[in-house]
Image (tube, rainbow, N blue to C red):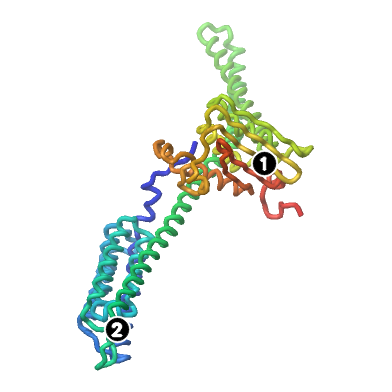
Amino acid sequence: MKPTIPNTMMSESRRNWRLQTLVRLRWVAVAGQTATIFYVAFGLGFPMPLYPVFALIAALALGNLLLVLRYPPTQRISPSIAVTLIGFDILQLSALLFLTGGLANPFAPLICVPVIISFTALPLKYASALMALAILAVSALALTPFPLPWHPGIVLAIEPVLKLGIWIAIISMLSFAAFYAHRVSLEAQQITDALAATELVLQREQHLSQLDGLAAAAAHELGTPLATISVVAKEMAQTLSEDPAYGEDVQLLLSQSQRCRDILGRLTSLSKQDEAHMRRLPLSSLVEEVVAPHRPFINDLSISFDARSETEPVGTRNPAILYGLGNLIENAVEHAETRVSVTVRYGENLVEIIIEDDGEGYAPEILPRIGEPFVSDRNRDQMRERAGGLGLGLFIAKTLLERSGAFVRFENTGGARITVSWPRWRMETPFEAGSRPS
């Protein structure tokens, strides 16, 4: 069964910011703005409207202080609150630049920073709203009547065509950097979510493999009290076997205790067989175990062997390989018309498992991206109609198989074809430090 994760759960970590992170960034802005104003006004002696400028910086500092006093450091904020705070930052910085030369101010590109930050962590609609606000602010900076602070008695005039060039440069940088930050953040989050799903699959497989050990432990622990019950039941049967009131009940007790002993004996036997089976598993047994659960769902599911070596690979039972191959075969059965074939090839150095079906194959626009998280594996529209189809199945299968040392290739040959290949030594021994033959 393929794991599914609700979209709301997957994106929750991206939608809630830790307030302390934003507060620290704003304190950095307050310190940088204050230091710059002091250096320009008092270090260089350039005239500027100090009272409005310091009022704007004080407003940012006061707002930040209120946040620190009102909320704990671990407080998380919703996207709507984050948009409000970042929007205020954009307006505060824009007003500061408006009073100090507008687009002529060399610090004008800093207006891009809050927008880029928002595109890394906020939903797209909120980040896009902040970008629109930033574009309006940059446009307003081109119309400022306040000159750039410069040497007294000298007005540094900026030609309109140069202002236009600066405006285009800032908007271009804003758009490109925001898009790039959004794509990188989105891909990183998708990988994180998909790998989390993969870890859940591995945990599930590990829990299943532990059931055999639990069965053996239970059989061992129950054996002693059940033996005592059997001894007492036999003694009671010898004494009360002819008793008309209790004779039948005692015989029933004796037969049921014997039945319990037989069940525990089978559990112990199966556990020992499974333990041995898990330690050594021939390639043919591995493939048959993977294929068997899917035979009832398709008319023609065949396995063929192409042996190019005298000895068959025999290796350690690997839940990652079992689940990964099972997922690929399940996908083939689901999309096939009437036939799925599994071809197993092995030689002295290479092991290949080829899975083919007679379905429509992979959509051309999806084929190059097969194996990426959240990319639907066949026809995209059909997959969206199916409940829970997140495109994680092939990603998990590919990730698990590649962890085992396999190379996975997807292609269309009429239907779909998947080739999974390992170096033979990876299939015959567990991948541990020092296990590779020299």
Type of amino acid under label 1: Glu
Disc on the earlier residue, 1 or 2:
2
Is residue 121 among the parts visible in the rendering? yes
Q: Position of residue 104 (x, y in %)?
A: 30, 80
Asked where in the image residue 303 lies, by quadrant, the reply is top right
Is residue 281 among the parts visible in the rendering? no
Residue at x 60% of width, y 39% of height: 322
Q: Position of residue 3 (x, y in %)?
A: 47, 41
Numbered label attached to residue 37: 2
Q: Position of residue 97 (x, y in %)?
A: 27, 77
Residue 47 in the image: above or below residue 125: below
- Which type of secondary structure does the marked residue at label 1 adopt? strand
Q: Is residue 369 left or right of residue 18?
A: right
- Which type of secondary structure does the marked residue at label 2 adopt? helix
Q: Is residue 431 left or right of residue 199?
A: right
Crowding near the residue tagged with mark 1, few <14, some 14–19, many ≥20 C-alpha atoms within 10 Å: many
Residue at x 58% of width, y 20% of height: 257
Q: Position of residue 51 (x, y in %)?
A: 20, 83
| Depth check, front residue: 202 or 392 | 392
| Depth check, front residue: 222 or 391 | 391
Q: State the CA–CA distance, disc 1 to disc 2.
A: 68 Å
Residue 237 in the image: above or below residue 225: above
| Depth check, front residue: 24 or 139 | 139
Asked where in the image residue 277 lies, by quadrant, the reply is top right
Numbered label attached to residue 306: none
Type of amino acid under label 2: Ile
Q: Residue furthest bottom?
A: 153
Residue at x 32% of width, y 87% of height: 39
Residue indicated by mark 1: 352
Q: Residue furthest right?
A: 310
Crowding near the residue tagged with mark 2, few <14, some 14–19, many ≥20 C-alpha atoms within 10 Å: some
Q: Is residue 285 left or right of residue 379?
A: right
